[in-house]
Image: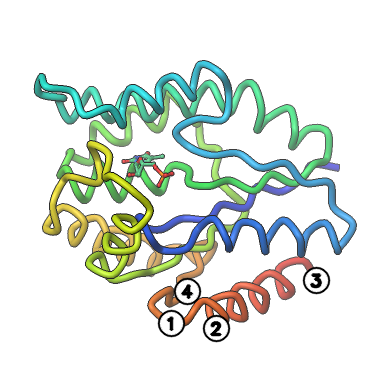
């Protein structure tokens, strides 16, 4: 029996890490074998791409370069980890997946739909997560939380307007797809966790 792919999404500072921990614990309590991944990253080569896209290069980083690196990392992760795990019946919990590209590069960087679709077709060939939990946070709040964790990387330095566009695209895409569940992550973490647990229990059942 094929496993399921559950993805946690959201802007920096949305609280993804603690939600992922919660999701893993809930699935394990329900008897599932769980593996976690993150994007960009999750294999040695994809982790190297992660370093590369986050690095504050002095040269201009073309938006298309950023986009292609995200999808290149995703392909590595799919082929080496996600597909094999699902085939073995394991449940995969992903810290980000394609929705991040659609929101950050499509919404934030304003890359056109045809380019986005071309890369998606090459990389995913129609593969999509079974369930996505989108943690919706106000960008200002999220960035303040991220700043509290240390220095901001190249993408985090893209400015508030970029993150406003990214969030708007997340909300738009979530509203259109019933497999993407929006959770208000501006609330205190205890309430966020309660909302996540309720959604997960319903899904597992
Ligand atoms: P994070 O996982 O620690 O949040 O870092 C990943 C960063 O990369 C974050 O700023 C979001 C960004 N990102 C994209 O812009 N596009 C993508 O497709 C993915 C997976 C991440």
Mark 2: few/some/many CA within 10 Å (<14, 14-19, 20+): some
Ligand 1 sits in quadrant: top left
Estimate how packed mark 4 is, as few (under 14), some (14 to 19) or many (20 or more) residues with alpha carbons within 10 Å: some
Callout 3 secondary element? loop
Q: CA gap, disc 1 to disc 2?
A: 6 Å
Q: Residue at x 68, y 61 (%)?
A: 23
Q: Which mark is residue 187?
A: 1
Q: Position of residue 34 (x, y in %)?
A: 77, 46
Q: Which residue is mark 2?
A: 191
Left or right, residue 32 beside residue 77 = right
For the residue pair 79 and 157, the one nearer the viewer reads as 157
Q: CA distance from mark 3 to mark 1?
A: 26 Å
**Residue 106 occupies which quadrant of the picture?**
top left
Q: Are marks 3 and 1 in contact (CB under 8 Å)?
A: no
Which label sits on residue 11? Answer: none
Residue tagged by mark 3? 205
Q: Residue at x 66, y 27 (%)?
A: 81
Lateral position of residue 42 relative to residue 167, left or right: right
- Residues 166 and 115: in front is 166
Q: Which residue is mark 4?
A: 183
Question: Are circles 1 and 2 on residues that touch, CB within 8 Å?
Answer: yes
SS class of the residue under badge 1? loop
- Reply above or below: 125 against 12: above
| Foreground: disc 3 or disc 2 | 2
Mark 4 or 2 closer to N-term?
4
Report x, y in % for residue 170: 33, 60
């Amino acid at each position: 029996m094929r496993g399921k792919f559950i993805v946690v999404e959201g802007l920096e500072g949305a609280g993804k890490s603690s939600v992922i921990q919660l999701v893993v614990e809930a699935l394990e309590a329900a008897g599932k074998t769980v593996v976690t991944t993150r994007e960009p990253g999750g294999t040695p080569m994809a982790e190297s791409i992660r370093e590369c896209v986050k690095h504050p290069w002095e040269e201009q980083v073309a938006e298309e370069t950023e986009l292609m690196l995200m999808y290149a990392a995703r392909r590595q992760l799919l082929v080496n980890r996600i597909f094999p795990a699902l085939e073995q019946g394991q449940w995969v919990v992903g810290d980000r997946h394609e929705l991040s590209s659609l929101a950050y590069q499509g919404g934030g960087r304003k890359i056109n739909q045809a380019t986005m679709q071309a890369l998606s077709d090459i990389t995913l060939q129609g593969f999509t997560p079974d369930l996505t939990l989108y943690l919706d946070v106000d960008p200002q709040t999220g960035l303040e939380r991220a700043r509290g964790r240390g220095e901001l990387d190249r993408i985090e330095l893209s400015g508030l307007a970029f993150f406003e566009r990214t969030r708007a695209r997340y909300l738009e895409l979530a509203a259109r797809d019933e497999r993407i569940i929006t959770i208000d992550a501006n609330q205190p973490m205890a309430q966020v966790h309660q909302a996540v647990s309720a959604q997960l229990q319903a899904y597992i059942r």
